Each structure stands twice: as structure tokens, then as C-alpha cells.
């Protein structure tokens, strides 16, 4: 079943083409897609009356998206590119966050805005964006499911946008 549907996995891998600057190759994405295909094959139940290709496509897409989130890659017109962290050092050795001007309005200081979030959301944002933890690592640290982490992150980013504007 897996061998018969390898083209489906490769099709989804090509859909998420990789920018050369990302440090990842098409083969990386293809391996992840095949992993999703294998997971689908393990969970597929022929008695449900669903075609395997329809069932497997959800697993393949999900596995690729999970990989991209954990590796902080986003999809653009040029392909997949890495998300830039604000904590990477500048030429002077300071981080971009430290290099930001600190006006008298406290909402311009990103760390203060993050700290103004509810505790669980602030901790999540700090883990993912300041400590470069994966969503799975954050889920373990916060003792919850990775789906909950995705929901919380979406809520936190929405609140940050509203408060920062």
C-alpha cells in the first residue's frame, strides 16, 4: 500500500518546495512525507469505506506541516524559508531584541508586551520564540497536547498583535 502511493507523498513534498537558503532539501521534505504515508498505512481501516489516498493525504500534509512548524520554516512564493529569531546576535554581538530602541511607551518593548499576556501564553511564547523550543518540547514543558499548543500560540499571537498596535 505504501509503495503504491509513494507518488502521492512526493506530490505533497513538491508542493512545499524548499528555498535553497533554508538549509533543507526536497529530499528532507520527501522523507517526512513518506513518514506520514507510513503512519497513514498503520492507521488505515479498510472497513471504513474511505479510499486510502484520501485518508493518507491528511497524514502526509499533517506530517509535513508539523515538520515545518518544528523547524520554524514558513511557506512563501520563493519556497520554504526559515523564520528569523529576534534573539540571534547582530554584528555587534547584541541580539536584535536588545538592539531595538526602548522608547518611554512600554508596549514597544516586546518582552513587556509578552509578559502582559496570561501566564500560560507568555510562557509558551517565551519557550518557542525566545528559547527556540519546538512545539512538542513546549507541550511537554507545559504539560499539554501539541494541538493545545497550536491553539494557544494562535491566541497569543493575536493578542500580541492587538496589544502591540
Image (cartoon, rainbow, N blue to C red):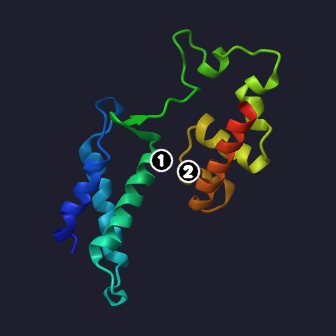
Instruction: Judge from the rendering whether residue 69 lies leftward or rightward of residue 59; answer left or right.
Output: right
Residue drawn at (18%, 61%), measured in percent from left and top? 7
What is the quadrant of residue 89 in the picture?
A: top right
Left or right, 13 with reference to 58: left
* Residue 135 relative to residue 159: left or right: left
Q: Position of residue 137 (x, y in %)?
A: 57, 51
Where residue 70 is drawn, which disc sits there? 1
- What kind of element bears circle 1? helix
Residue 26 drawn above or below residue 91: below
Residue 29 position, x and y percent, is: 30, 49
Q: Residue furthest bottom?
A: 47
Which residue lies at the image location 30% right of the left edge and 57% below the top edge? 33
Q: Position of residue 117 (x, y in %)?
A: 77, 42
Q: Which mark is residue 135?
A: 2
Q: Is residue 91 above or below residue 126?
A: above
Q: Secondary structure at mark 2?
A: helix
Q: Are marks 2 and 1 in contact (CB under 8 Å)?
A: yes
> Where is the N terminus found, in terms of image quarters?
bottom left
Amino acid at each position: 500500500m505504501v509503495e503504491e502511493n509513494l507518488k502521492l507523498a512526493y506530490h505533497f513534498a513538491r508542493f512545499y518546495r524548499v528555498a535553497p537558503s533554508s538549509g533543507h532539501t526536497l529530499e528532507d521534505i520527501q522523507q517526512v512525507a513518506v513518514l506520514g504515508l507510513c503512519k497513514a498505512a498503520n492507521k488505515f481501516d479498510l472497513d471504513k469505506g474511505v479510499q486510502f489516498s484520501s485518508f493518507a493525504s491528511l497524514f502526509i500534509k499533517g506530517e509535513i506541516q508539523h515538520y515545518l512548524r518544528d523547524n520554524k520554516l514558513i511557506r512563501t512564493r520563493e519556497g520554504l524559508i526559515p523564520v528569523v529569531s529576534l534573539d540571534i546576535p547582530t554584528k555587534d554581538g547584541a541580539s536584535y531584541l536588545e538592539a531595538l530602541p526602548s522608547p518611554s511607551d512600554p508596549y514597544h518593548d516586546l518582552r513587556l508586551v509578552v509578559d502582559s499576556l496570561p501566564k500560560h501564553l507568555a510562557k509558551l511564547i517565551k519557550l518557542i520564540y525566545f528559547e527556540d523550543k519546538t512545539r512538542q518540547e513546549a507541550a511537554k514543558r507545559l504539560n499539554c497536547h501539541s494541538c493545545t499548543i497550536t491553539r494557544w500560540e494562535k491566541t497569543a499571537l493575536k493578542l500580541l498583535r492587538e496589544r502591540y498596535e
